Amino acid sequence: MHVIEVNTKKLLKDFVHCAPSFYSNDKNYIPHLQQDIFPIFNPQTNSLLKEGNIKAWLILNDSNKIIGRIAAFYDANQLKSKIGGIGFFESIDNYEAAKILFETAETWLKNLGFIGVDGPINFGERDKYWGLLTTANAIPSYQENYNPIYYQNLFESNSYQLLFQQLTSEISVETFNIDRFQNMANRIFQNQNFRFEHFKVKELDRFANDFVSIYNQAWQHRPDYVPLTLDRILITLNSLKPILLEEGIWFAYANNQAAGFFVAIPEVNQLFKHVNGNLNWYGKLKFLLFRYFEKLNRMRGIVFGVIPAYQNQGLETGMIMKFYAAMQKTKQFKTCELAWIGDFNPKMQSLIQSLGAKTSKIHYTYRKMFS
């Protein structure tokens, strides 16, 4: 076995294209879109590379067949904490191959002065490509990490220790505990100081500004907080425009101040499973055809936040009830996945459970200290 650094366009293509080869016998596997992965490695499309860096490697067997890959990276915030990141890990079920990959990535970070590493994580937003799936028979959602169960042993046998769990829950129109929340929601909706608006594409700039304001207030207490910029959220919202459902995104305002948001998008992996990870012209054609003939029936909640000044005052319930009413009105969407609730957020976990949602997936985020 030998490792090569990904330092040419051809090798980067090999790095991205090799992923499906590790899932040839997995009926649930849906490859990530190449068009989503390549920009992460491109300084022109990933602003984190202005102050950070990313390196990637492939491991080949004696027949020069790719048997694994890994990337290591850091952004401006990780430079301060000296805790780097690894991600986009794939490997055959072989301890030695995995060990070589981990050590290669770790050595690069150590030589730059880092004292530890988190993984598998994304070089970017937390709601994408983050954590190691530890639940069997789970269907992967769009931009969600998916992996064989044996990856858990590969990480843990190489001294990676659990940092936190990310829970994903699922709720349906039938299981939603509406009786518990209806009276509370009615009181909230009658409060003249509160109002709720769904996202409107024609006012994208206004909602983007409100999103940044809410996010930076709600998340700034987290030790791994990185300020969100307007440019970054505009890129994200514009990239999601083709699949956004306006009434899947709700904002709460308190005393005319942007105070909370709930963002859910259609679960487009129901369609992307047909394009084989490539949204080229042929993939786009297949996407449009299946979008016409195969109706989406799942939503995925990807981010939920309220600024500290208005937490536990009912805004969370108000946004949930507005979203629920919108889904009932469409009659198209039957279930919603509520993703990325960390075990460090027991209040949100309790709220999700009280809605009637059941845990469907668990992802682990690991940390390894070098000394």
Image: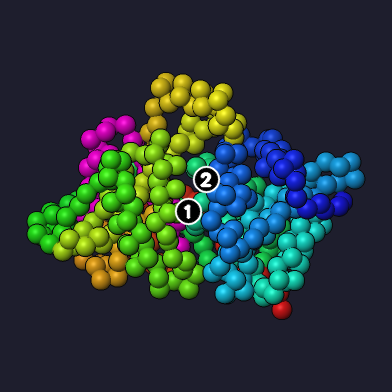
Residue at 13%, 54% (x, y): give it: 189
Amino acid carrying label 1: it is Asp
Q: Residues within 10 Å of mark 1 (few under 14, many from 20)?
A: some
- Residue 153 position, x and y percent, is 69, 58
Q: Which residues are magenta?
A: 317-342
Label at residue 127? 1
Query: Reading the chain from its start, which is encountered first: label 2 or label 1?
Result: 1
Label at residue 143? 2
Residue at 70%, 40% (x, y): give it: 13
- Relative to 300, say whether 268 is above or below: above
Camera-side residue: 56 or 174?
56
Residue at 52%, 41% (x, y): give it: 139
- Residue 330 position, x and y percent, is 26, 33
- Residue 86 position, x and y percent, is 65, 60
Quadrant containing the C terminus is bottom right
- Relative to 167, say whether 118 is above or below: below
Picture colour scheme = rainbow
Amino acid carrying label 2: it is Gln
Residue at 59%, 32% (x, y): give it: 278
Q: Are marks 2 and 1 in contact (CB under 8 Å)?
A: yes
Left or right for 318, reference 83: left
